[in-house]
Image (cartoon, rainbow, N blue to C red):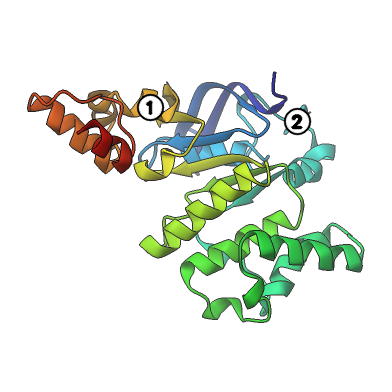
Amino acid sequence: MAEEMIKIENVNYEYTSFGDDDKLLAVKDVDVSIKKGEHLVILGHNGSGKSTLAKLMNGLLLPTKGDVYVKGMNTKDEEKTWEIRETAGMVFQNPDNQLVATIVEEDVAFGPENQGIPPLEIRRRVDEALRIVEMTDYKKHAPHLLSGGQKQRVAIAGILAMKPECIILDEPTAMLDPTGRIEIMNTIKKLNKEEHKTIIHITHYMDEAVEADRILVMEKGQIVMEGTPREIFSQVEEVKRLGLDVPQVTELAYELRKEGIDIPGNILTVEELVNAL
């Protein structure tokens, strides 16, 4: 049985506006266990609570009710805050908000320097992180001259250099063009399969969810669907009822089935559709 990386137990999170009377329950009665090495995708439209859940997973937010554990450490334990954030690194939507230095390699070194890592080890970590995200050739470049996808890969390298076991990506492709999105999806796959990182990927792009081990679908702060990509996307009508789409090829297979063509209802890739036809 795989070791537990993150455990969320009966968690609520309320946002309070200036007047105490106005409370917004962003996450409601959530119970989730995420295994070490798992690639989990959390889907939901804007306002469904998925970004709030992401911030609860590494202690950026603390639950109003319930508990969040990262490798057994409770996020409410102030003495463990830094250890928790070193275990579960976070990559945000806008890479410009995460890049702090004027040269790529200095940016990647920023986290380990703050951890007090010795200079020789920092050099090794920076080189390794840039190699993993395939940005070694750009280590002397200025981050602001890079493309969106390249900037996001540098932001991921900055997290990798801090040696987290788990990486939480909060809509990392939302601001990228299609090329940048492909770059980041390839990086995420590599981090999970080759570097054996636990990946928690929040997105509203259905085609990005196809690669996951497991999908959670959120609606109004609650988890309303859970299963493998095949299990989730074969329920086309239920996914659409929640205001989400299914991958384009799954949609096409669904329409063909409605026209009476006998093909499986759980197709996820172009290859599968071609073979079925």
N-terminal of the pair, mark 2 or mark 1, is 2
Q: Considering the numbered disc 2 on the image, is that residue within a helix, a strand or a loop? A: loop
Residue receiving disc 2: 71
Residue under the point 25% across and 24% down: 264
Residue lying at the far left in this picture: please name it.
259
Q: Is residue 211 among the parts visible in the rendering?
A: yes
What residue type is disc 2 on? Answer: Lys
> Residue 116: image x %, image y %?
89, 60
**Residue nearest the observer in this picture, 117 or 83:** 117
Residue under the point 50% across and 61% down: 94
What residue type is disc 1 on? Answer: Arg
Residue receiving disc 1: 230
Going by the image, does 96 lie left or right of 125? left
> Residue 51: image x %, image y %?
50, 42
Residue under the point 44% across and 63% down: 180
How far apart are the two marked residues, 2 and 1, measured between alpha carbons? 29 Å
Q: Is residue 98 among the parts visible in the rendering?
A: no
Which quadrant of the figure contains the C terminus?
top left
Estimate how packed mark 1 is, as few (under 14), some (14 to 19) or many (20 or more) residues with alpha carbons within 10 Å. Answer: some
**Residue nearest the observer in this picture, 183 or 41:** 183
**Residue nearest the observer in this picture, 22 or 14:** 14
Which quadrant of the figure contains the N terminus?
top right
Q: Nearer the viewer, mark 2 or mark 1?
A: 1
Going by the image, does 208 lie left or right of 94? left
